[in-house]
Amino acid sequence: MRWTDIQQIAAQLAAKHPDRKPLSVEFPEVRDLVIGLEGFSDDPARYNVRILESIQLAWSDRKD
């Protein structure tokens, strides 16, 4: 899984952290949570704020 696999990452975050409120998770923690997902194999340094925001919003959409 890579940083650009937004929907797959969001699905795993929603499954792994069902009680979290995605929009209250700060970007550094979103980054850490993604890096810690099973199957994540991208370079941990290849993210940017736009990617983290996209992940956070997609994760939030799965919670609604």
Image (cartoon, rainbow, N blue to C red):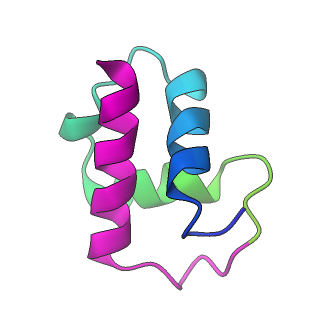
**Identity of the residue drawn at 30% across and 33% down:** 60
Eyeballing the image, is 35 above or below 56? below
Majority secondary structure of magenta residues: helix
Q: Residue at x 53, y 85 (%)?
A: 46
Quadrant in the rendering for residue 28:
bottom left
Q: Quadrant of the C terminus?
A: top left
In the rendered structure, the answer to whether residue 62 lies left or right of residue 33 reads left
**Front in this rendered view, residue 28 or 11:** 11
Return the residue nearer the eye: 45 or 13: 13
Spot occupied by residue 30 in the image (x, y as percentages of width and height): 40, 52
Asked if residue 60 is among those painted magenta in the image, a careful observer would answer yes
**Residue visible at 40% across and 27% down?**
62
Looking at the rendering, in which quadrant would you find the N terminus?
Answer: bottom right
Q: Is residue 6 above or below residue 41?
A: above
Relative to 57, residue 45 above or below: below
Q: Which residues are magenta?
A: 42-64
Residue 34 lies left or right of residue 51; in this view the side is right
Residue 19 left/right relative to 24: right
- In the current view of this chain or complex, which residue is farthest to the left? 24
Q: Position of residue 8 (x, y in %)?
A: 61, 47
Give x and y (percent) for residue 15: 59, 23
Let me know if residue 56 is in the magenta part. yes
